[in-house]
Structure formats: structure tokens, C-alpha cells
Image: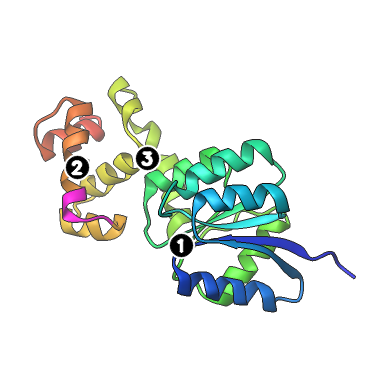
Amino acid sequence: MNKKIKIAVVEDHEQFRSKLVELVTEAANMELVGAYRDGLSAIKGISLTKPDLVVMDIRLPDISGVECVRELKSAFPQIDFLMLTAYEDSDQLFESLKVGATGYLLKRISSTKLMEAIRELNNGGSPMTPQIARRVVKFLSNAPKSHQPEFAELTPGQINFLEELSEGYSYKEIADHLGITVHGVRNYIRKIYDKLHVHSKVEAVNKYLGR
């Protein structure tokens, strides 16, 4: 008989957490060893149960899912972490990967594909929804576009923002793509202008494109 995959779930939304618990419990080759609604209880519980894989929400009511992964991965490097998020946030994506997560999915993924992703991750893969994988590829292909030192200070999310701006998308369209508010767009613009030492959208795009 194949050994069951020991799974822990970290999700603050009660209904979605219950759904994840049900999916794992009913899976023939999985065993649920813990379900947590916040980061602190997750760190404590996971440290004791030492699951094979953790399904981790990024946005939690106390410390973030990224911080949970950072702390747990340093203590238990053998544990795999699959991040779940409702938003295509590039900065959170890359922060998760940097601290040790090896899978990243949007919550709107189907139950069947989520179970497939858990098995894929347990078998050494790095499952990502197509939208997320596209962001990784896009960032890696566009990051070296400019060798100007100011660009080293930009976050992955700001790089993606500039890329979409250079492709002619409106602020509203970019906000929709990145899963941020109009206020979030203003914050992106202000920080990008400060880092690139520019004062307009045209200047920012031209500098990004190396003109």
C-alpha cells in the first residue's frame, strides 16, 4: 500500500477551509493532520505534526502566509508548501517562491486540479496556474531589459506594472490584471516614479524600454 501524503491546511476563510479539509479527507492517498485559521496556530501545529505538504493561504489575519513559510521552511526544509491566493499579486508570488514555496495557485482553481497539483507537488513538481506561470515567465524575460541601476530597486510587481503600461494597457485594466484597487495603482505609480526618478507615465515607459 502506498504511504499517504500527510497534509496540513492553513486558511482563515471558514467555508473555504472546510472545503479543503473535505477534499483532503476524502482523498484516498492523503491524510489530514491539521487545519488552521491563522499563522501563529499553524506554525505551532505544523511544528508538531510535521506534514509532508502544507496548503497555505497567503492572506491571514495575523502574520502572512509568506512569513509562515519563511519560518517553517527554515526549521523543516523537507516540508513542501503550496500557496493559495485569490489575487494575482506578483510581489507576493515572488516573495513566496523566495522563502521556499514550490507551488502557487489561484483559489478559483477547480477541486480536481487542486488535488492534481497536490500530488504533482508531492512528486517533485512545481504546480502553478497558467496565469501565475505566465507572470513568472514574463518577469524573467523582461527583468534584464534595462541595465540601469534604478531597475534593481523595482519589485517584481512593479516590473510587471511597467511592462503592462508599456504594452498600452490602461490603469484600470492593469488594476484588474494585478488584482489591486485604483488606490493600489496610485501607490505603484508613485513608487515607480520615485525609484526611476521620472515624473510622468511617458518618461517611465521610455526609460523602461531603454529609449
Q: Amino acid at mark 2?
A: Asn
Structural crowding at the residue carrying mark 1, measured as other residues with C-alpha within 10 Å and reported as few (<14), some (14–19) or many (≥20): many
**Magenta segment:** 180-184
Secondary structure of the residue carrying tag 2 is: helix
**On the picture, is 10 further left or further right than 193?**
right
First in sequence, mark 3 or 1: give its number: 1
Q: Is residue 206 left or right of residue 88?
A: left
Query: Disc 3 residue type?
Result: Pro
- Helix, strand or loop under label 3: helix
Which circle, 3 or 1, is nearer the viewer? Answer: 1
Residue 156 - label: 3
Please report the residue visible at 31 percent of the width from the left and 20 percent of the height from the top.
Answer: 149
What is the magenta segment's predominant secondary structure?
A: helix
Residue 39: give x, y in percent of width and height.
51, 50
Residue at 68% from the left image edge and 79% from the top image edge: 26
Q: Earlier in the sequence, mark 3 or mark 2?
A: 3
Please say if the residues under marks 2 and 1 sit with CB atoms less than 8 Å apart. Answer: no
Residue at image mark 2: 187
Which numbered disc, 3 or 2, marks the residue closer to the eye? Answer: 2
Q: Are the residues at dot 3 and dot 2 in contact (C-beta closer than 8 Å)?
A: no
Q: Residue 119 placed where, x, y %?
A: 69, 64
Q: Is residue 80 visible?
A: no
Visible in this render: residue 191? yes
Q: Amino acid at mark 1?
A: Asp
The foreground one among 126 and 168 is 126
x, y percentage for residue 204? 17, 35
User: Mark 1 = which residue?
Assistant: 12
Alpha carbon separation for disc pair 3 and 2: 15 Å
Mark closest to the chain's N terminus, 2 or 1: 1
Q: Residue at x 61, y 77 (%)?
A: 22
